[in-house]
Amino acid sequence: MTREDVRQAVIDILGDIAPDEDLSSIKDDLTLREQMDLDSMDFLDIVMELRKRFNVEVPESDYQELISMASCIKYLQPLLKDHQLAS
């Protein structure tokens, strides 16, 4: 997956978890919690969706790597390099 594919995959997951949020204006450098009304259960849902959709295990010690869109992309791109974005 390219950087843009990973970004889109994260946006798709966020859209499923928080369907009422405007995802078109997500900035890469701000924390997702600053931009969206996410609680700790929503965050766990993100981790679970990554496992379900891409078979990616995110250990609890790495949760801080998913704090912003930029950090999500940086962390996930190497893990998803061999995956294809579902159409």
Image (tube, rainbow, N blue to C red):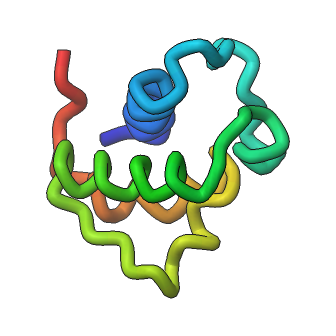
- Relative vertical location of residue 42 with respect to residue 86 in this rendering, above or below: below
User: In which quadrant of the rendered view does residue 28 lie?
Assistant: top right
Furthest-bottom residue in view?
A: 61
Q: How many numbered badges does the structure rendering display?
A: 0
Identify the residue at horizontal 51%, vertical 86% (top origin): 61
Going 38% across and 80% down the picture, which residue do you hit? Answer: 59
Would you place residue 12 above or below residue 76 in this image?
Answer: above
Counting from the top left corner in percent of width and height, residue 41 is at: 51, 54
Question: In the picture shown, does residue 25 fall above or below 1?
Answer: above
Q: Quadrant of the C terminus?
A: top left
74 left or right of 46 in image: right
- On screen, residue 16 versus residue 86, left or right, reads right
- Name the spot of residue 74 as percent of width and height, x first: 55, 59
Q: Quadrant location of residue 35? A: top right
Front-lying residue, 60 or 37:
37
The reply to whether residue 73 is visible in this rendering is no
x and y percent of residue 47 in the render? 39, 57
**Residue 76 makes an appearance in the image:** yes
User: Residue at left 64%, top 18%?
Assistant: 21
Instruction: Residue at 64% x, 50% y: name it.
Output: 39
Task: Give coordinates of residue 68: x percent, y percent.
Answer: 69, 51
Left or right for 59, reference 55: right
Q: Quadrant of the N terminus?
A: top left
